[in-house]
Image (cartoon, rainbow, N blue to C red):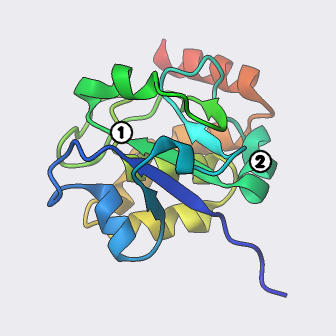
Amino acid sequence: MQPRTVRISIYHAKQCDPRKCSTLKLKRFRMVRVVHRVKLLPKGAVVLNPFSGTAFSPADRDAILHQGLAAIDCSWIHADEVFELNIRGVSRCLPYLVASNPVNYGIPTKLCTVEALAAALYISNFKQEAKNLLSVFKWGSHFIGLNQKLLDAYAEAKDSGEIIELQENFMT
């Protein structure tokens, strides 16, 4: 029996340059399901939300395996408004990581959609799936390399509380 793959869904708010959009590229490679209405995200999926009060951790692995992983693709300029929408699922924010995408290279916490998804997959021990997503981008492999120490530490954490402690240690 083949292992179950992670179902990834992305709400695309159509606020970015389609030529630079990581979501649309993942869609072209048939690696994700893209929806244009928030209510079409899978009920119960783990939704990556930078405004969530709970940190993403390896404890979210079972929910991802059974309900899927979801992201919201919108402009950082409009993120406040988009994340105020009634988003179904379990919201989680990613811990401190540094962007490697060409638009926000080196900027802490300003990840593009594929980086956010790859980080969540890596932390929840779907490391090969994370690498597969990043492999369609020239700069993709640099994300894990740039954040290797952080990602490996986060992947060893037990829960959200430990993630917060690790994050605080890295940031001081």
Q: Position of residue 169 (x, y in %)?
A: 58, 17
Left or right, 124 with respect to 148, comes to right
Report the number of discs: 2
Q: Position of residue 45 (x, y in %)?
A: 67, 46
The answer for how far apart the CA atoms under marks 2 and 1 are is 22 Å
The amino acid type found where label 2 is placed reads Ala
Task: Residue under label 1, please give it.
Answer: 111
Q: Is residue 100 above or below residue 107?
A: below
Q: Position of residue 145 (x, y in %)?
A: 41, 52
Q: Residues within 10 Å of mark 2 (few under 14, many from 20)?
A: some
Name the residue at 14% across, 50% down.
17
- Image disc number at residue 121: none
Left or right, 16 with respect to 143, comes to left
Name the residue at 77% across, 77% down.
3
Left or right, 101 with respect to 62, comes to left
Q: Nearer the viewer, mark 2 or mark 1?
A: 2
- For mark 2, give the secondary structure: helix
Q: Is residue 16 above or below residue 133?
A: above
The amino acid type found where label 1 is placed reads Leu
- Lower position in the chain sequence, tag 2 or tag 1: 2
Q: Nearer the viewer, residue 34 or 139?
A: 34
Residue 21 visible, this angle = yes
Q: Nearer the viewer, residue 88 or 4?
A: 88
Left or right, 113 with respect to 87, comes to left
Task: Residue under label 2, please give it.
Answer: 63
Q: Position of residue 38 (x, y in %)?
A: 49, 42
